[in-house]
Amino acid sequence: MSQAPERPSLGPHFAIYVLGQFDRAAAGVRADVRRAGAAAVRAAVEREIGTWPLRPGAAFTLEVAAILFEVDTTIAAAVLERACERLRRAEASEWERAWHRAAVALLEGPPLVHRTNWIGLTADWPGGRLGVGAGDVGRFGLVPHLSHVRARFARDPEFEFSWGLALEQKAHAWHALRGAVLEGRVNGPRFVFQKEAGRAVLEQPRDVNHQAMFGEVGVQLRDLTDAAAAFDLVRQASPDLRDLALLHLGHVRALRFEFDRALAAWDELEVSADRSIRYLAALLGSRVLARVDRPTEAIVSAAEAVEQMPSAPSALLMLAALRAAAGEDEAAANLVARALASPEDSVDPWWSYFRGHHAEWRPRLQVVRAGW
Amino acid sequence: MVMSRRGALIPALALLIGVRLAAEQRPRFETGVTAVEVEVSVDRDRRPVTDLTVKDFELFDDGVRQALVDATLESRALQLAIAVDTSASATGDLKTAIRRGLTDAVDLAQPGDRVELYALASRLRRIATVSDLDLATGPDGAHTALIDGLAALMLSPPQPPRRRAVVVLTDGIDTNSVISRSQLLTLAGRSASFIHVVAIDDGSGPFQLGAEHFEGYAWILPAITGRTGGRFARVAPRDQLRSTLQAMLDPLRRMYVLRFVPQGVRSAGWHELRVRLTRPGRFTIHARTGYEAGRD
């Protein structure tokens, strides 16, 4: 199939690409040196970009950010925000929508945990000090960015999905940091976690550090409510994103301890055309079923996940854990052996559950390049 | 916990035992196969005590004193499984310390031991040599499934006659496990392996905010190691790890095996174990804190 000739990228004309080469060659180079380089690039871009025409400047900034994400996610997000500020001063357009789609895909990409990301838990979010999930500095930029985008492109299913995903991840991380995902309890005297009328209630952390990290209980609950509303909108508005939104809606319900409603959402996905979604619905379902002490059904659900993706380690280990708890030690050991023997390049959809549309950032960037 | 007087009970948190079933590796109370084996190490002034007999031990299962069938001192080689964190969070001094700990652990292996190496990120993978760690950069490298990895290590069966000792070198961060902490606790109670965790605290990660954060996040690590009869240690990157690892592994080479048939206790679920010596003196007893019995 012939392709239209690709329009030349702006990137090669600028020294920023040297940074990319440096990064690839710099395994072992001190991280602070790399971050200093990224900061210098950021300063240069911010100094120069205001003199550029709007679209070339925004497109170039996007390319710069794509590289900077490999070095420092916070700096990359800041560079994107600078371009976003300029775009917001002009009339909204479909090209701008494409630009934001690429930017959001980039912002969804950083790994969940970075060495510096614990600091990120006190980040400023719209509406108050809410914190960032799993200490992910890279997602600093996602929520403020989406708050701008959602105002300009109201009820756009893709942006609504990303909004829900950011809030879901933040809430999930809040639970995970406390070692309490779906468990309804923590083993610490300063926390009381209980199920109350379908709502998770946490005693206000007394320690100032915990207050900074975990924020307020009401905020967490509001996040989950907002995330559920966003996913609900998406599943109704977008046939393409319907299954994905339903998958995440179920998880949000589970984080709210609405286990039956979570399972009901995932039940609808048994006939999804997307194998990864069928896999994740079964995997997450097994976790919730184990949580509510329905071990036989949990085993069935985990086995379904294994059937969908036979070499995905997460499902194999979940099934092994469930069967071991049922006294089936030999079967459990065999499943662990299968997980350990799964191919080196095997991919488990769970590993990218929170990464949204990150895998699509390159083609989305191509759309931006083609349009400016 | 050190016993300072005759007859003092050993608090549960200080116990470090191994539980094995004489016939089938797991308690089966409803079928009449009820013998339970508990592996115990005893030392005095940091030197192993090797002259004890069955009359010197008392064992309590859920608070009920049990009649010991026998107590024998058994020397065994180790099946040593070493897992190291290779995820994106293990960088800089932390990475250096983890690699050093791995080398130390391998060095502590003795003739007759069998060594297995694992890299832990989003998944646990078996590697052939230490140098293979640098190749662990697949699609699973960004995250750490510490809980899942611990579960996999617990569920891998020992290969008798060796005792299976697992050493996990980690920063304590877990980002994407699917197995819950409560599930892991159950598995730990059933594990026939001794699980040791060395958490290297470089001033960031789950230990950054001190003890309170540790309680909220990483409490699972000492909890599960105690259940298996292993130990938990929190160290700094520049600490000498060799002595820590040696203190974990050496007691496993010579252990008393206490055998008993549970009497007067419920069949399924968690059983808290306590062991004490009747012999006077200051002894340190290491034993697991209990075991999980399942139904047939």
Image: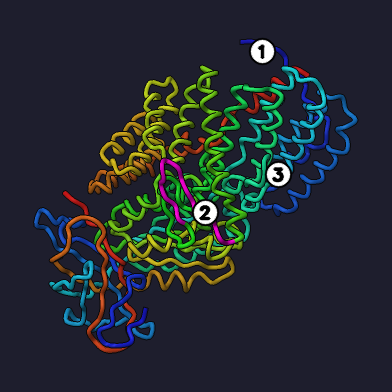
> Quarter of the image holding residue B282?
bottom left
Q: Are marks 3 and 1 on the same chain?
A: yes
Point 82% across, 26% down: residue: A89
Q: Where does label 3 land, which residue?
A: A74
Q: Classify mark 2: helix, strand or loop.
A: loop
Q: Residues within 10 Å of mark 3 (few under 14, many from 20)?
A: many
Identity, as a three-letter code, of the amino acid under mark 3: Thr
Point 17% across, 57% down: residue: B267
Quarter holding the N terminus of chain B?
bottom left
Q: Where does label 1 land, which residue?
A: A3
Q: Are marks 1 and 2 on the same chain?
A: no
In the image, residue A348 lies at what x, y percent? Answer: 46, 36
Point 45% across, 55% down: residue: A192
Residue B175: mark = none
- Looking at the image, the residue that sits furthest to the front is A197
Q: Classify mark 3: helix, strand or loop.
A: helix
- Horizontal side of A11 relative to A340 (left or right) equals right
In the image, residue A214 lies at what x, y percent? Answer: 57, 51
Tell which of B236 and B275 is nearer to you. Answer: B275
Q: Where does label 2 land, which residue?
A: B173
Tell which of A207 and B53 is nearer to you. Answer: A207
Residue stretch rendered in magenta on the structure: A192-207
